[in-house]
Image (cartoon, coloured by chain):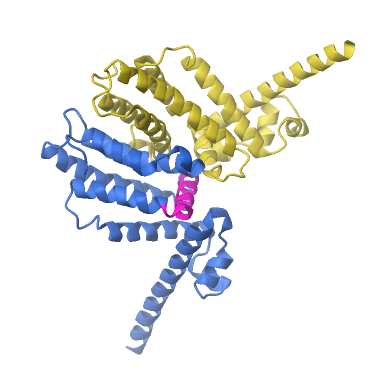
Chain colours: A blue, B yellow
Amino acid sequence: MMGAVSATGGYLKGRLRRQDILGAAIEVYAEAGYHGSSLREIAKRAGITHAGLIYYFPTKEALLAAVLEHRDTQDADRERFATTPPGREVLRRFITLAEHNVRNPGVVDLYARLAAEAVAADHPAHEYFQRHYRTARDIALKSFQALADRGELRDGVDPNATAVAFIALMDGLQVQWLTAAEDVDLVGILKSFVDNVLTSPLD
Amino acid sequence: MMGAVSATGGYLKGRLRRQDILGAAIEVYAEAGYHGSSLREIAKRAGITHAGLIYYFPTKEALLAAVLEHRDTQDADRERFATTPPGREVLRRFITLAEHNVRNPGVVDLYARLAAEAVAADHPAHEYFQRHYRTARDIALKSFQALADRGELRDGVDPNATAVAFIALMDGLQVQWLTAAEDVDLVGILKSFVDNVLTSPLD
């Protein structure tokens, strides 16, 4: 019994420690970007030793994939993707997410780099990205499908192709925006894409 | 006089050598992808020593940026972007380029990785990507603008936002397609994007 309690306590403590590290990592990437961020700084910010960090995340890739997974959870919670009924409001929340990203270039940079590296099937973050894309496309598809069912999608617009395009557009715009922010109105172009497939504009 | 002739001969020879190396590099990347490609293999294929290659391209990044620049020239020549009047035909040629890319994942992988790395202003390929995006968007913009002028773009569709979105969509789709080819019909989705903004489909 004591053993079980202690194990549970240990498990919970480990989970909280993991959360501390991920929270610290997201902060550090947001502030310093991909190149300015070190595992040492992340450990320091999480109040843990470098060896302690390695205990939870044995490789840098494992930490990076966990950072992005954690960020997806935060994004989903903040934009209430799971509880908002499919339709215009979900698309509005995607635009709000893009606005959030524009204020956090460090994590967007991390995401774009890791996405390009992780196309290889043997990369530690490969499965994360497959899952991430599928989840994002699925949320978008449900909304475009609901709008099609209600006649709010223009004739001839395919909900599935539009969902895949919407998520790909978001990712592609981020890289161009990181390269030359002055050339790319990320949020405006995303909104204009949505307006183009709807029978009446989003707002 | 002799000196001038010799200098010209040397210059020409150097330019041809550079072309050999770039041609070899594109072949090797197309066959073996980013991770399977080594400078040693590229040198071997170009019939030059490793030291000889380093003479022309002192760093790996310099070679990679030159590979992509050379590929842009090849793409532009093959699709005749400079000599095709702006309009539907140019958009069709972008779709043909996407079909070409689907048959050459190795170079697409190289492009996607370098694009993500080169967002940093001090990266050796940063200027290449700024130029690449501007050129690509400009070609697309001229065509969407010409179509708008002829009333072939749907009401309310902005040629500039559409051009930026079109190029970003191409890039974003490539990364998702490299990650899970079975999930993403790259060419179909690109074509469907164009059809959605035109008053009548592309074909």
Q: Is residue A144 left or right of residue B95?
A: left
| Foreground residue among A29 and A11 | A29
Q: Is residue A74 left or right of residue B10?
A: left
Q: Main secondary structure of the magenta part?
A: helix
Q: Is residue A92 magenta?
A: no
Q: Which residue, as the protein is rendered here, is positioned at the far bottom?
A: A2
Residue located 19% across and 46% down the image: A88
| Foreground residue among B85 and B186 | B85
> Against B37, is A71 above or below?
below
| Label tally | 0
| Foreground residue among A40 and A102 | A102
Residue located 70% across and 29% down the image: B44
Which image quadrant: the N terminus of chain B?
top right
> Against A164, is A49 above or below?
below
Q: x%, y% of residue A161?
A: 27, 34
Q: Is residue B56 left or right of residue A167?
A: right
Which image quadrant: the C terminus of chain B?
top left
Residue B28 visible in the shown view: no
> Against A17, is B18 above or below?
above
Q: x%, y% of residue A28?
A: 50, 63
- In the figure, residue A168 lies in which quadrant? top left
Q: Which residue, as the protein is rendered here, is positioned at the far right?
A: B2
Q: x%, y% of residue A47?
A: 51, 75
- In the figure, residue A157 lies in which quadrant? top left
Q: Is residue A110 magenta?
A: yes
> Against B153, is A112 above or below?
below
| Foreground residue among B101 and B33 | B101
Magenta region: A103-117
Residue A151 visible in the shown view: yes
